């Protein structure tokens, strides 16, 4: 793994956590920029500019910040989830109670603990993101479920068959080709979205978060 990519990417993926959590009062000039998640396909890439057609059909011009980082995702399996792993699971409340996973990201060990918590997410309406440590590995007795712990709390999440399970992988600028699927955690700026990290799909695997 590329050490400089992983910590920076995680900060981008979990930036919404710090924005969503209550904090002590701060001066306006000390507040962090508003975050926006861009999901879509690349239209064009050149230098520090990335044009993306979003999943909503809008074309957005993203400015890439100085020193921006790039990574991709690789396929993993439910059976790869082990006790002690740090995972990010987007989920929705289930009709029968509890949560059902929409996607699972198994973080590399170097990223363990960052962005820990459970907070609102915008993958789907009413979805949440839980970044937590696996307390119990996936079990198959009552369907596939995993128990995760964060800040002294526990949460059980069911992982339905077909749920995307991925991990972080390296990428290069050559992967930023038209049609490639991206997930970009960006900052809202007067000139448009400003990105410090980009997660790009490759080898048929797309960022599911």
Image: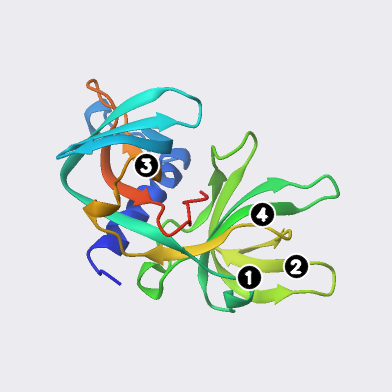
In whole angstroms, how far apart are the C-alphas of marks 2 and 3?
30 Å
How far apart are the alpha carbons under marks 4 and 1? 12 Å
N-terminal label among 2 and 4: 4
Q: Which is nearer the eye, 184 or 54?
A: 54
Identified at 52% across, 55% down, the residue is 117
- Indicate the position of residue 130 as horizontal and vertical percent values: 56, 55
* Label 2 residue SS: loop
CA–CA distance between discs 2 and 4?
10 Å
Q: In this view of the protein, can residue 32 be seen by the observer? A: no
In the image, which disc is placed on residue 144? 2
- Whether residues under marks 1 and 3 lie with C-beta atoms below 8 angstroms apart, the answer is no
Query: Label 4 near label 2: C-beta < 8 Å?
Result: no
Q: CA distance from mark 2 to mark 1?
A: 9 Å
Q: Which residue is mark 1?
A: 78
Chain-order first, disc 4 or disc 1: 1
- The residue under label 3 is 185
Q: Is residue 10 above or below residue 47?
A: below
> Would you name the residue on which mark 4 appears?
101
Q: Residue at x 47, y 52 (%)?
A: 206
């Amino acid at each position: 793994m590329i050490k400089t990519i992983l910590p920076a990417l995680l900060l981008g993926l979990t930036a919404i956590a710090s924005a969503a959590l209550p904090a002590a009062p701060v001066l306006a000039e000390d507040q962090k920029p508003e975050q926006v998640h861009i999901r879509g396909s690349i239209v064009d890439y050149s230098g520090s500019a990335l044009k993306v057609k979003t999943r909503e059909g809008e074309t957005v011009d993203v400015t890439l910040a100085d020193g921006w980082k790039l990574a991709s995702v690789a396929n993993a399996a439910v059976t790869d989830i082990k006790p002690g792993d740090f995972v990010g699971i987007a989920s929705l409340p289930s009709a029968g109670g509890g949560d059902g996973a929409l996607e699972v990201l198994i973080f590399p060990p170097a990223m363990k603990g960052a962005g820990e918590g459970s907070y609102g997410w915008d993958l789907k309406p009413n979805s949440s993101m839980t970044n937590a440590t696996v307390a119990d590995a996936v079990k198959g007795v009552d369907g596939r479920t995993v128990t995760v712990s964060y800040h002294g709390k526990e949460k059980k999440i069911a992982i339905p068959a077909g749920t995307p399970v991925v991990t972080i992988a390296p990428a290069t600028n050559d992967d930023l080709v038209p049609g490639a699927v991206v997930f970009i955690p960006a900052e809202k700026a007067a000139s448009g979205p400003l990105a410090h990290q980009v997660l790009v799909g490759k080898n048929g695997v797309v960022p599911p978060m």
